Amino acid sequence: MEAYAQVLTYAIPGFVILIIIESIAAKLLNLSVNRPMDTISSLSSGMTNTLKSLIGLSIVIVSYGYMESRIGLFDIQSTLWLYILTFIGLDFAGYWSHRFNHSINIMWNRHVIHHSSEEFNLSCALRQTISSFVGVYFFLYIPMALLGIPTKVIAIASPLHLFAQFWYHTRVINKMGFLEHIIVTPSHHRVHHAINDIYIDKNFSEIFIIWDKWFGTFQQELKEEPPVYGTLKQSNTWNPILINFMHVWQLTKDAWRTNNIMDKFKIWFMPTGWRPADVIEKYPIKIVEDVHERNKYETVDSSPMIAWSWFQLIIHNVLLFHLMNNIGTFDVNLITVYVIFLMVSIFSYTSLMDRHPIAVPAEVLKSVIGLLIMINLGGWFGLENIFSMSTIIVGIYLTISLLMTLYFFYYNKRQEIQRPLPQFSSKGE
């Protein structure tokens, strides 16, 4: 985990630099690809995924190492060709796990966060799940285990395979000539993120587009059908933690409400979006019907509110880097407490972005946790060893954060409520 944290300390700044470059390129091309609150929500989602990874909050049914040691048929030495073979194997497994996530009701909850942004940009690539607690796709790695690909090779290739999927989440790159026939390009992935009828559940490939062409799920981007992004059931929140569990909560309610005993069980494994007939009748859900007339989720925000949200994002990234850089010196209890504090804090400020009432008690809880941490540790996770005023600065931040939350929710909200909510239509994008 320490090695993974160190890799992220280099990867995250790289992602941020590319997001800035994309924003500049979009302005030069006269494209609108970023909205402040949407981008903050996406980057906050990336933080929650990193925090989950740092505490290893997942259950592995069968580990790859176990499979490789039991069923491996060959003893392959580490060579360049081995890494290439591993990369292809990971991509094959990635295609099918991705397709299963789109196809099965309960599995969609693992992936919905990634599609929840109604924009398509590099920041939305960082919307990664925190709700996949159980590793259920171990069987997809059996072919690599049979070949005897070493666990250490998988450990090296997996992050590279994941990071290589970042760059094509953009609208500033058009079609890429002959590469369109080989790799996943921005054009291919724009199709995948679109909710237009012709684009739904297409282009599941992660690096090599050949899998979609072989297995019948390929769709090229059409000039006459501009992609519209998001999900058919809009999330209508900036809070990435809520988005992660919205779908499973809906499934749980539907399973409880239906009178059909069989439906209580099969709802989890039916195709994504399936609901019992009696529940559909009594508890209808609003679904986007005409994607080109769909209004994007938006909140009425003042410039100070937007600036404060950016400030919160920056502060939490600084704290995240402090955690990652010191993870080797913290025991599991300290890491867990730090992660809980940051998760509650992200929940608070993204709820405030929604102007949801839960933002206030969440901020109070954050303040209490922060105060207890400083009392019990005599400072902020050893930060006072770097500069002596750190404990006072963190205390001042917690106080200001609570006061600003109260201000923006109770006072600034009343001022803004008179302003008309902007409507962003998908038409013409």
Image (spheres, rainbow, N blue to C red):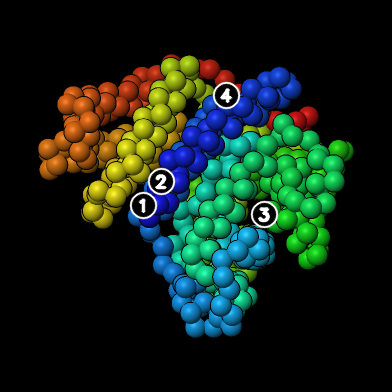
Asked whether the viewer can see residue 358, the reply is no
Q: Where residue 108 sits: x, y (%)?
A: 58, 59
- Mark 1 or 4: in front is 1
Contact between labelled residues 1 and 2, with CB atoms less than 8 Å apart: yes
Q: Is residue 288 above or below residue 297?
A: below
Contact between labelled residues 3 and 2, with CB atoms less than 8 Å apart: no
Callout 3, which amino acid? Glu
5 to the left or right of 174: left
Q: Secondary structure at mark 1?
A: helix
Q: Residues within 10 Å of mark 3 (few under 14, many from 20)?
A: many
Q: Nearer the viewer, residue 284 or 202?
A: 202
Q: Where residue 279 sits: x, y (%)?
A: 58, 62
- Mark 2 or 4: in front is 2
Callout 2, which amino acid? Gln
Q: Is residue 393 above or below residue 290?
A: above
Residue marked by disc 2: 6
Residue marked by disc 1: 2
Please tell me in which quadrant of the rendered image residue 71 appears: bottom right
Q: Secondary structure at mark 3?
A: loop
97 to the left or right of 67: right
Residue marked by disc 3: 206
Callout 4, which amino acid? Leu
Q: Residues within 10 Å of mark 1 (few under 14, many from 20)?
A: some
Give the label on residue 421, or none.
Answer: 4
Q: CA distance from mark 1 to mark 3?
A: 27 Å
